[in-house]
Amino acid sequence: MMTLNLDALTTTALALLLLGGGVLLKRHSRVLTFLCVPAPVVAGFGFALVIWLLRKLGVLELTLDTALQGPLMVAFFTTVGLGGSLGLLRHGGKTLFIYLGACWALAILQNLVGVGAAGLFSLDPLLGLMAGAVSLEGGFGAAAAFGPVAEGLGAQGAATAALAAATFGMVAGGLLGTPVARWLISRHQLRLDSHNSAELSQLERASQGSVGTLDSATLLRLLTCILVIMVLGFWLGGALDAHLGVVLPSYVGAMFVAIIVRNLNDRMRLLELPDSAISTLGDVSLGLFLTMAMMSLKFWELEQLGLPLLGVLLIQVVIMLLLTVFVLFRLLGRDYDAAVLCAGFMGHGLGATPNAVANMGAVCEHYKVFSYKAFIIVPLCGAVLIDIVALPAITWFINAFAG
């Protein structure tokens, strides 16, 4: 068998080429667009599958140097923290707090179900966590981040299991969200109208934040801010590990430092931090690090986990459906907006925020009624506010069940 070792620069260049190819492929595929599969997943998953087949046939064994994956991952979570303005909560009203509370509760519930279901299938509890909030509500970003941590704590195949579970969740969330909402609307014969208010308009303006172009001065300022926060996150993680024995990954520490910086800056206005520029840097960091993570998938490790892991994920989907239909829909008011919000909840509770937006768009397009409330609250919670509780909860569960 031929062996090929790629250095860090070559691996990064290959990841960029694959990412560009994934963007083009998704743009021309109706199925991938419908399911909202991220371009990095399309590219990296396909590459890893080819490498696995070549390895199985005894043709090629490829080793990748993904040294830049870690810094890119920390940079992404730093941009998530910089987007986490707690001032948004003041404008959200009752519905935002109910929906956000459900998202936070789901993060804990998915971890509990993952650990419990892992026991039923004789899996390591850490592998159960990889099929919990790590890969479902957390999506590909958290799966790629926490999988190696669990693997480092002794859970063999955890990184591959987490990304495989995230892929399953992405498909399930995209397929189930719209049918659930349509069933709720039909079952309860809901009036097809949507709530709009000055309170929601204020929330929309607040969530848009500052805008600006990514010119050289802005890029220099943001890169400096992000890199300093990343260093502080490394120090925080090291200090907690050394003094308290708590394994806090550097990207989690960086995210919390970034949240503190963002909210202090909201009060003191020391730096101009355009949300659109932060989002652009975050998208680039996420795209590259996720492509590298998917490229490194080891399918031969997943072969032994296949059926037990699928069993855990099916239990998660059933519980998600029951929670959405019988609890969240009622808490949100049992109206058209609530049904559209439930479609979004299914989308990012199992997959990611783009799934949620696509689900809600499909529902609104079918009934020709736009849910103003859903399209403000779901992206805000799914893309920003969930992580305030979800990531610490994942960290605690990993520490609690390690070893």
Image (cartoon, helix red, strand yellow):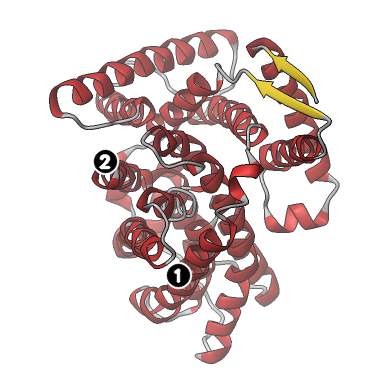
| Nearer to the camera, 40 or 364 | 40
Q: Identify the image quadrant of residue 128.
A: bottom left
Mark 2 or mark 1: whose residue is earlier in sequence? 1
Residue pictured at 31% horizontal, 27% vertical: 253
**Looking at the picture, which amino acid does disc 2 mark?**
Asn
Residue pictured at 52% horizontal, 13% vertical: 218
Q: Quadrant of the C terminus?
A: top left
> How much space separates mark 2 and mark 1, taking CA atoms?
25 Å
The answer to whether residue 125 is left or right of residue 8 is left
Label 2, residues with CA under 10 Å away: few <14, some 14-19, many ≥20:
some
Residue 208 coordinates in the image, percent (x, y): 47, 40
Q: Quadrant of the N terminus?
A: top right
For numbered disc 1, what is the local secondary structure? Answer: helix
Residue 195 visible, this angle:
no
Residue 217 coordinates in the image, percent (x, y): 53, 8
Residue 199 coordinates in the image, percent (x, y): 36, 57
Residue 377 coordinates in the image, percent (x, y): 44, 56
Q: Which mark is residue 320?
A: 1
Considering only vertical position in the picture, is 261 above or below 374? Answer: above
Considering only vertical position in the picture, is 229 above or below 328? Answer: above
**Looking at the picture, which amino acid does disc 1 mark?**
Met
Residue 8 visible, this angle:
yes
Please name the residue that numbered disc 2 is placed on. Answer: 399
